[in-house]
Amino acid sequence: MSEFEPNETGGKQNPPTGEELWREEFPVASAEQGFVERRQFGRFLVLTSGAMVAGQLWLLGKNWLSEVETTEYPRKAVALTSEIPVGGTKVFQYPGPSDNCLLVHVEPSKFVAYSQKCTHLACAVIYAPEKKRLECPCHEGYFSIDDGHVTQGPPPRPLPRIELEVEGGQIFAYGISVFGKET
């Protein structure tokens, strides 16, 4: 008996080995499979770039629309000038009942007020009269009493400033200045 078997035509053929059978089933060469064609790569770059441009345009439009809207803040009496000594403070709520603000009597004729929420993690800021600065005790963030900018620590932005007006011995809050822009 021969080691080759006859086929339908009567001829003899070699039996397929394991590797040849695998190549018949999967004709893709593995070395070529890892390569990306130039067109596929170009298509990927164009689609990714288009998505980034669309995202930037979305953010630009959203920012532009938010600048168009202006918020009207109420004029609200927050304290009497006589009730806060120089170097003293008073906590008040403005513009809403859950928005704590800190009013500071810095000099005999100078009052300033800022949001009491630290811009880092919303801890309550306190006034340090001996150092003439606002301090966040949670993570040692310090703010200037003059304009609310960050002087030290992790807070990323200055404190929102409450616009004040003194009239007839009474202090009124009438707006909020956020990041140097009046709103």
Image (cartoon, rainbow, N blue to C red):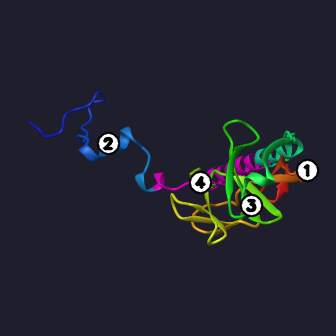
Q: Residues within 10 Å of mark 1 (few under 14, many from 20)?
A: few
Would you say 170 lies left or right of 154 here? Answer: right
Q: Earlier in the sequence, mark 3 or mark 1?
A: 3
Tag 4 secondary structure: loop
Farthest residue, direction left? 1
- The tag on residue 105 is 3
User: Considering depth in this image, is 31 or 133 the residue closer to the camera?
Assistant: 133
- The tag on residue 168 is 1
> Which residue is label 4 attached to?
37
The range drawn in magenta is 32-57
Tag 2 secondary structure: helix
- The amino acid on which the numbered mark 4 sits, given as a three-letter code, is Glu
- The amino acid on which the numbered mark 2 sits, given as a three-letter code, is Trp
- The tag on residue 22 is 2
Mark 4 and mark 3: Cα distance apart in space = 70 Å
Locate the N terminus by quadrant. Answer: top left
Mark 2 and mark 3: Cα distance apart in space = 86 Å
Residue at x-position 19% and y-position 34%:
5
Q: Is residue 142 magenta?
A: no
Badge nearest the viewer, 1 or 2 = 1
